[in-house]
């Protein structure tokens, strides 16, 4: 299966992740890959697991370029990124970074 995403210049910020083809609602887009870390950084995704454990993942693949939106079209469940709705080709894939970013869209 080929990746449904491509990285390119983003109108939101720097680089972004874009759909190469139509991505269906609830479809797995990819897995956020990287080394576990306890330090925050530009490409660190913080994941809270069901048991309450919080782990930072220092992104090493294309998903490290996910940008923030208050009303995102994707969500991370653990390290896995899923589409919240159908995403047409060419649309930037975004996630909500959380409460600290509530005033930014």
Image (spheres, rainbow, N blue to C red):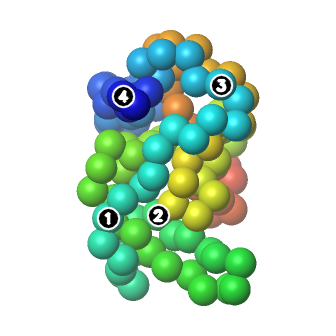
Number of numbered tags placed on the structure image = 4
Q: Mark 1 against mark 3, which lies toward the viewer?
A: 3
Question: 100 or 98, which lies in front?
Answer: 98
**Residue 33 appears left or right of 102:** left
For residue 24, the mark is 3
| Rendered position, 44 above or below 69 | below
Q: Are marks 2 and 1 in contact (CB under 8 Å)?
A: yes
Q: Please name the residue shown 54% across and 54% down the image.
A: 80
Question: What's the CA distance linking mark 3 and mark 2?
Answer: 23 Å
Horizontal and vertical percent position of residue 73: 65, 34
Q: Mark 3 against mark 4, which lies toward the viewer?
A: 4
For residue 34, the mark is 1
Identify residue for label 2.
Answer: 45
**Residue 30 appears left or right of 73:** left
Q: Residues within 10 Å of mark 1 (few under 14, many from 20)?
A: some
Dot 1 or dot 3: first in sequence order is 3
Horizontal and vertical percent position of residue 31: 45, 52
Question: What's the CA distance linking mark 3 and mark 4?
Answer: 15 Å
């Amino acid at each position: 299966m080929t990746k449904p995403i491509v990285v390119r210049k983003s109108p939101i910020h720097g680089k972004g992740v874009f759909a190469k083809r139509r991505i269906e609602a609830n479809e797995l887009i990819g897995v956020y890959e990287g080394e576990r870390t306890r330090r925050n950084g530009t490409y660190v995704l913080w994941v809270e697991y069901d048991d309450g454990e919080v782990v930072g993942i220092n992104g090493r693949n294309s998903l490290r370029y996910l940008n923030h939106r208050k009303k995102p079209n994707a969500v991370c469940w653990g390290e896995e990124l899923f589409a919240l709705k159908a995403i047409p080709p060419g649309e930037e894939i975004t996630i909500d970074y959380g409460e600290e970013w509530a005033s930014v869209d």
